[in-house]
Image (cartoon, helix red, strand yellow):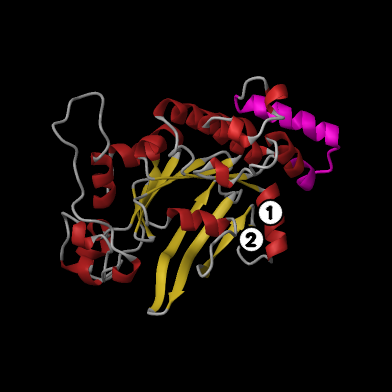
Amino acid sequence: MAASTQPPLLEVKNLRIEFPTRRGTLVAVDDVSFDIAEGEVLGVVGESGAGKSLTGASIIGLLEPPGRIAGGEVYLAGRRIDNLPYEKMRQVRGREIGMVFQDPLTSLNPLYSVGSQLVETIRTHTDMSESAAQQRAIDLLGEVGIPSPKIRINQYPHQFSGGMRQRVVIALALCVNPKLIIADEPTTALDVSIQAQIIDLLKRLCRDHGAAVMLITHDMGVIAETANRVAVMYAGRLAEIGPVGQVIKNAKHPYTHGLMGSIPKLAHATERLVQIEGTMPRLTEIPNGCAFNPRCPKVFARCMVERPDLTPVDSSQISCWLYDKTMERTGSHG
């Protein structure tokens, strides 16, 4: 975590994202708060539809309409950014926040060479000359592990494999040394050996550039390899957030426990993996109380009616009535 004298690089406070529909307003992300320190990798994990990607998109001002931020605040290096006008946010997005998406082809224009795309991004956000920007682009391609960068800089996206395209996208995200990189499922479309290389690359770049990384994924294995802390999302809320080693070895929220049980372990053979019964609720059908209660093996009466808030437990925070200290003492809401 960031030292108390220095604010975290990214602070998300009570974020709420809504989608107005004909049948009423759907809440897709509900009261989510977290921060990321300089040089830290925060993994954000959960099933499809948990709200991970929407949270990332809202931070960078790329929430697709009709989705909208209906509450909360986002701060980057102490400056509020969620209420900036479009043009100001566009500058922040290029200069201070880099993005790596699941499909590199969404970030690369097929009609331009990768070099021209890198050079354009560098020159848009810095006062570098054409030749200096060209050299920086070649250096970046080399840094992300693309062989013969002087030759490959003139090639087009379709001339690169999926893994190499993803490296180009990472180079693009790093063009102007952003403070924060948001990586949304950056390894999903790649085979396992390439995934490992991309993960190593993200870790190294984070270390060398001092950037903070928000790594969004549904893959706990990727989180275990990469992140310092992990935030587990379920049905638009945070279920658990804490140091990655603690969450993986000693998951406290019943949902996180189920997620961990679904990871194959190489050390000993398992007859079958643990399975979380049921599926995550649709936004139109989120139950009262704790959203996980219909699937939870430890559910009790209070879970059905009252929604728990994040509570500090050891060095983590858990959103679960099992850890409510006031309950034993007073029976009151904690």
Query: Would residue 139 be counted in the magenta stretch?
Result: yes
Q: Residue 73: x percent and y percent?
A: 56, 64
Label 2 to label 1, Cα distance in Å? 8 Å
Which amino acid does the dot numbered 1 rest on? Val
Q: Which mark is residue 92?
A: 1
Please name whichever residue, 228 or 334, is drawn nearer the observer in this view of the structure: 228
Disc on the earlier residue, 2 or 1:
2
Q: Which image quarter holds the C terminus?
A: bottom left
Asked if one can make out residue 203 in the rendered structure from this viewpoint, the answer is: no
Is 68 left, or right, of 270 in this rendering? right
From what the image shows, is residue 134 above or below residue 294?
above
Please name whichever residue, 209 or 182, is drawn nearer the observer in this view of the structure: 182
Q: Could you say which quadrant of the image residue 294 lies in?
A: bottom left
Q: Secondary structure at mark 2?
A: loop
* The magenta segment: 122-145
The reply to whether discs 2 and 1 touch (Cβ–Cβ < 8 Å) is: yes
Q: Which mark is residue 81?
A: 2
Asked if one can make out residue 173 in the rendered structure from this viewpoint, the answer is: yes
